[in-house]
Amino acid sequence: MQIRIIAVGKIKEKYLQEGIAEYEKRLRPYTKLQVVELAEEKRPLSVSPANESIAKEKEGDRILAAIPEGSIVITLDMRGQSWSSENLAGSFREWELSGQNQLVFVIGGDLGLSPVVLSRSNLCLSFSKMTFTHPIARLLLFEQVYRAFRILRGEPYHK
């Protein structure tokens, strides 16, 4: 299985960079992983809702251009479905068995995801009803993908 993570924005915090690097290393035996970081749309600190919408659309266009044809697209959005780690692992198994081996996870910028990206999504997930920064959401995603592979392989991982 190949996994691409498309994320708007860079990880600036060293502790998050280190955590993500650790999970990237742990994932190497399980999957071919690629991270695509896209630039956040530049805008002034005080911006109108119309300009926010334009910025989100531009980021959305860049996201769509980075999605390989035929991929299963999973977006992360606070309005998405809440799944257990076991549900995610089970879906990995189903996608693998059906021959769909290219998964793309999408994490938007601080404005969220554009409607066109959400409509391209095969599945929209939420980690929680709580709000997380996008860098922390990325770390959580890496951990959950790693956990899903451990569950699939019947390998021990704390619960």
Image: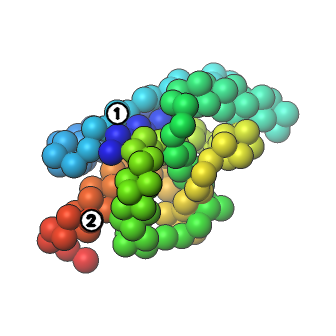
Question: In 3D space, how far apart are the residues under numbered discs 1 and 2 (Cα atoms)?
Answer: 20 Å
**Residue placed under numbered mark 2 in the picture:** 152
Relative to 56, residue 112 above or below:
below
The residue singled out by tag 1 in the image is: 34
Residue 48 image position (x, y, % from top left): 82, 34
Closer-to-camera residue (49/6): 6
Instruction: Give the quarter of the figure containing the N terminus.
Output: top left
Relative image position of residue 16 (x, y in whole percent): 31, 44
107 in relation to 42, above or below: below
Residue 6 lies, in percent from the top left, at 47, 36
Left-right relation of 53 to 133: right
Image side of residue 26 versus residue 127, left or right? left
Tell me, yes or no, whether the two marked residues, 1 and 2, touch with CB atoms within 8 Å. no
Give the amino acid type for the residue marked by disc 2 in the picture. Answer: Leu
Left or right: 145 as drawn, with respect to 125 = left
Above or below 150: residue 50: above
Residue 70 location (% of width, % of height):
54, 37
Dividing the picture into quarters, in which one does residue 82 lie?
Answer: bottom right
| Type of amino acid at the residue the image marks with label 1 | Gln
User: On the rendered image, what quadrant is the C terminus found in?
Assistant: bottom left
Q: Residue at x 49, y 63 (%)?
A: 127
Apparent side of residue 73 relative to residue 120 in the rendered image (left or right): left
Nearer the camera: disc 1 or disc 2: 2
| Helix, strand or loop under label 1 | strand
Of residue 92 and residue 78, the one placed in the foreground of this image is 92
Q: Earlier in the sequence, mark 1 or mark 2?
A: 1
At horizontal 55% and vertical 31% (from top left) the residue drawn is 69
Q: Nearer the viewer, residue 103 or 82?
A: 103
